[in-house]
Image (tube, rainbow, N blue to C red):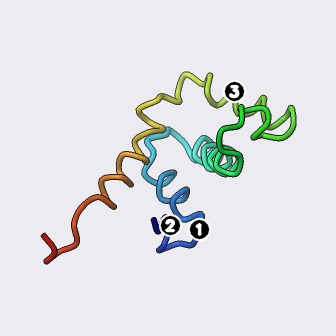
């Protein structure tokens, strides 16, 4: 699996944040940071992935924000999945 081949190993995070449906840049930056933290510690609970209390609190505040919805966060993932699952032109 060649994840993030266009933008390096972390390119998938940038692509998903860019396509996420979040209301402002601050929330997009927070999502980007959360993706970095959670993907660096797969299977770990949020406090262990975040590393310290301030980052853990910021993560839970992000999740609790009424302007952040599951659909908004997942929109980037769905768009990225659709993009990589389409066959290349001329290959069918």
Front one among 10 and 15: 10
Residue for badge 3? 61
Q: Is residue 4 above or below residue 41?
A: below
Quadrant of the snapshot with the N terminus: bottom left
Query: Going from the N terminus, do you reach mark 1 or mark 2 first?
Result: 2
x and y, in percent, of residue 9 in the image: 59, 68
Instruction: Name the residue furthest bottom.
Output: 90
Q: Residues within 10 Å of mark 1 (few under 14, many from 20)?
A: few
Q: Name which residue lies at 75% across and 40% down.
A: 49
Q: Is residue 7 above or below residue 71?
A: below
Tag nearer the camera, 3 or 2: 2
Q: Name which residue lies at 47% across and 68% down.
A: 2
Residue for badge 1? 9
Q: Name which residue lies at 62% across and 50% down.
A: 32
Determine whether, in the image, residue 2 is placed left or right of residue 52: left
Q: Secondary structure at mark 1?
A: loop
Front one among 6 and 40: 40
Q: Name which residue lies at 63% across and 44% down.
A: 26
Q: Secondary structure at mark 2?
A: loop
Disc 3 to disc 2: CB gap under 8 Å: no
- Find residue 53 and name its label: none
Disc 1 to disc 2: CB gap under 8 Å: yes
3D distance between C-alphas at marks 3 and 2: 28 Å
């Amino acid at each position: 699996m060649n994840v993030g081949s266009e933008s390096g190993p972390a390119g998938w995070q940038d692509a998903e944040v860019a396509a996420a449906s979040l209301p402002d840049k601050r929330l997009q930056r927070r999502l980007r940071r959360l993706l970095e933290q959670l993907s660096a510690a797969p299977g770990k609970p949020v406090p262990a992935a975040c590393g310290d209390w301030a980052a853990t609190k910021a993560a839970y505040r992000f999740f609790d924000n009424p302007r952040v919805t599951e659909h908004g966060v997942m929109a980037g993932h769905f768009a990225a999945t659709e993009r990589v699952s389409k066959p290349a032109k001329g290959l069918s």
